[in-house]
Amino acid sequence: MSQVVFITGATSGFGRACAHRFAEAGWSLVLTGRRQERLEDLKTQLGSRVPVHVAALDVRDDSAVKAVVEALPGDFRPITALINNAGLALAPEPAQRAALEEWHTMIDTNITGLVNVTHALLPSLMERGEGASIINLGSVAGQWPYPGSHVYGASKAFVQQFSYNLRCDLQGTGVRVTDVAPGLSESEFTLVRNRGDQAAYDKLYGDTTPLQPEDIAEQIFHVATLPAHVNINRLEIMPTRQAWSPFAVDRD
Ligand SMILES: NC(=O)c1ccc[n+]([C@@H]2O[C@H](COP(=O)([O-])OP(=O)(O)OC[C@H]3O[C@@H](n4cnc5c(N)ncnc54)[C@H](OP(=O)(O)O)[C@@H]3O)[C@@H](O)[C@H]2O)c1
């Protein structure tokens, strides 16, 4: 049986790097994201090496998620690894100035979208059983508070707890669950968060050494290919040059 990875948000950043990493190891790829053109580009790049199935998908749309899963060609099931990676941060300003609509978009994508995909693929992962993995992209923001993180960090705290709770229910099925929680990583994520502001991107990543999408993809590949009896519950990864802040004290 071939090894099949299903990646959400494969059109950029960690998801795209995972597509390349798993292709390198000969896995079959199911690549999803909203930008069809980028999916087609990936299929052109990787399709001569491994079987690639692409499907334009907005994870917020529950029926579209179900339709994509039901339409998976036989060669691409059962799924060995689900990488629940599609996600975004918006509203970099403090909570009291954030737009409610942007909070809703983060909840709809990072929570509802992740739940939609997980629910639709659980039967396939259970069919694979031993050695299967659900790898959810959390964040250091799910554990550590910082200004401007409000709903984004809270959505990633959901990802962490949902991952742990899934572990409990899936015990005995062979399906593993991991919350991968990266710190500062260079990707389009920061352009999305700052509404395309290149100066904000350059400031965040300038004069330091952030993680690259390939660093995260390597860890995700490691998690997915551990011996079947090994489950990493949570993997938090920071660049060496990142650490925590001291407590903030408001003074006169
Ligand atoms: N970069 C960081 O510093 C960092 C740190 C910790 C955690 N993370 C998390 O890691 C994940 C990937 O981030 P990244 O850095 O790789 O960001 P990225 O380069 O902006 O990639 C995000 C991906 O999510 C997809 N996406 C967004 N909304 C979607 C939707 N409604 N439906 C389907 N796909 C959607 C995007 O594809 P389309 O636009 O084509 O749909 C894109 O492929 C996210 O969950 C993010 O929260 C990032």
Image: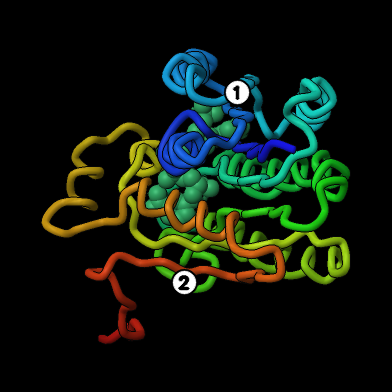
Q: Are marks 1 and 2 in contact (CB under 8 Å)?
A: no
User: In the shown orientation, is residue 118 left or right of residue 251?
Assistant: right
> Is disc 1 surrounded by few (<14), some (14 to 19) or many (20+) residues within 10 Å?
some
What is the distance, in whole Å, between disc 1 and disc 2 at their CAs? 41 Å
Q: Position of residue 17 (x, y in %)?
A: 42, 39
Secondary element type, mark 2: loop
Q: Is residue 218 above or below residue 104?
A: below
Seen from the viewer's position, the closer of residues 103 and 14 is 14
Seen from the viewer's position, the closer of residues 149 and 44 is 44
Say which residue label 2 marks: 145
The structure residue drawn at horizontal position 80% and vertical position 47%, both measured from the top left corner, is 125
Say which residue label 1 marks: 51
List the single residue furthest toward the front.
1
Q: Nearer the viewer, mark 1 or mark 2?
A: 1
Q: Position of residue 48 (x, y in %)?
A: 48, 17
Which numbered disc flags the more N-terminal residue, 1 or 2? Answer: 1
Q: Is residue 145 above or below residue 44?
A: below
Secondary element type, mark 1: loop
User: In the shown orientation, is residue 227 left or right of residue 41?
Assistant: right
Q: Position of residue 217 (x, y in %)?
A: 44, 49
Q: Is residue 6 above or below residue 185?
A: above
- Label 2 is placed on what type of residue? Pro
- Label 1 is placed on what type of residue? Pro
List the single residue furthest toward the left.
207
The structure residue drawn at horizontal position 54% and vertical position 15%, both measured from the top left corner, is 36
Quadrant of the rendered image containing residue 29: top right
The structure residue drawn at horizontal position 55% and vertical position 41%, both measured from the top left corner, is 102
Quadrant of the rendered image containing residue 133: bottom right
Q: Position of residue 33 (x, y in %)?
A: 57, 27
Asked whether residue 193 is in view, the answer is: yes
User: In the shown orientation, is residue 104 left or right of residue 72?
Assistant: left
Asked whether residue 90 is in view, the answer is: no
